[in-house]
Image: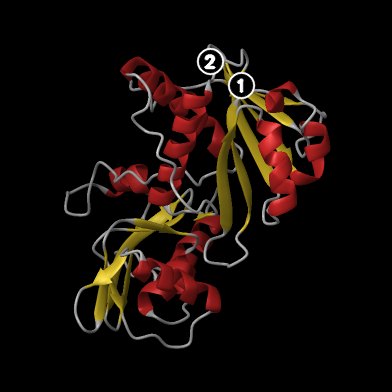
Amino acid sequence: MTARTRGASIRIFLIDGTPQGLRLIERIGWTGCCLSFSRADYDRARQRAELKRSGVYVLVGADPDGVRPTRVYVGEGEEVRVRIDSHIREKDFWSSGFVLSTKDDSLNKAHIRYLEARLIAMARTARIAALDNGTNPDALGRLSEPETADMEAYLDEALILLPLLGVTAFEIYDEPEASAVMPVTKDDQAQIAGKRYLLKTQLTEAEGYSDARGFAVLAGALARKETKVMHPGYRRIREELVAEGVLADENDQQYRLSRTFIFDSPSSAASVLSGGSKNGRTEWRDERGRTIKDNEEATAASPA
């Protein structure tokens, strides 16, 4: 059993006794911890010991530009609350904060700069959330080999905690072990990556499936270059993917998806690829021609 598949016990302490309030997240045997709070509760969160220590933090909120569902900012500080105090004045987008530190305040400046740089790089690669950071700090390679290993181990633990709190910005997509060209049974395919769906419209051909983070479209999908009437949000996503080379030129009429990409919904995926507003729940079809909507309704109607 690998570390990625081993079961894990995580303790979430509701400091206020309510799930909406301050939360302290820890794991047995790990010296790290994560404090989660809303912007409205920051006045109380900044009195906590976790914010008086050295650490890294993630600020999360809705993306004002609408290109992604969320926007994140990653920062570090030898006393975290000093930095977040400035973001209360300077950054309006964020509504939730997450501070990663240690119970014994053992992270030094080099450690937190390394963690900050790694998280920013991961968010840029994942492209799940819009990144508010302007540049990627040059902090990698400044730690010794043992310290680098320690910080990577710290990240492994932190990246288990953050998705539990709704922070998915650092989840880099891993290709399923079974690819589209491998013969797999229906049951195997469902276990590996969920039911596969195909999208075929004029100049558009793609394969994807529902993922816990959204709707994943596999690398190699063909997208139509010409656009029709589109929702402004879908148009912005499309323009960003073209600018970043995720949708790369294939020929005069088509783009090709250069890597597997997770859209926030089947409709977002279908609209961006086809160049016009589409209802993804009726456009994506499985190998039997059934739509996502058909399969969802059949599941809901089946005996428990």
Residue 70 badge: none
Residue 173 relative to residue 185: left or right: right
Q: Quadrant of residue 31?
A: top right
Quarter placement of the N terminus: top left
Residue beneath the point at 78% across and 36% down:
21
| Element type at mark 2 | loop
Report, in whole angstroms, how far the alpha carbon at label 2 lies from the one at label 1.
7 Å
Q: Residue at x 55, y 43 (%)?
A: 74
At which x and y percent is residue 264? 50, 60
Q: Which mark is residue 26?
A: 1
Residue 143 seen from this side = yes
Residue at the image point whose x is 52% and y is 54% from the top: 302
Q: Nearer the viewer, residue 291 or 135?
A: 135
Pointer 2 with pointer 1, Cβ within 8 A = yes
Q: Quadrant of residue 207?
A: bottom left
Q: Is residue 142 above or below residue 222?
A: above
Mark 2 highlights which residue? 30
- Screen quadrant of the C terminus: top right
Q: Is residue 175 above or below residue 107?
A: below
Q: Amino acid at mark 2?
A: Trp
Q: Is residue 73 left or right of residue 189?
A: right
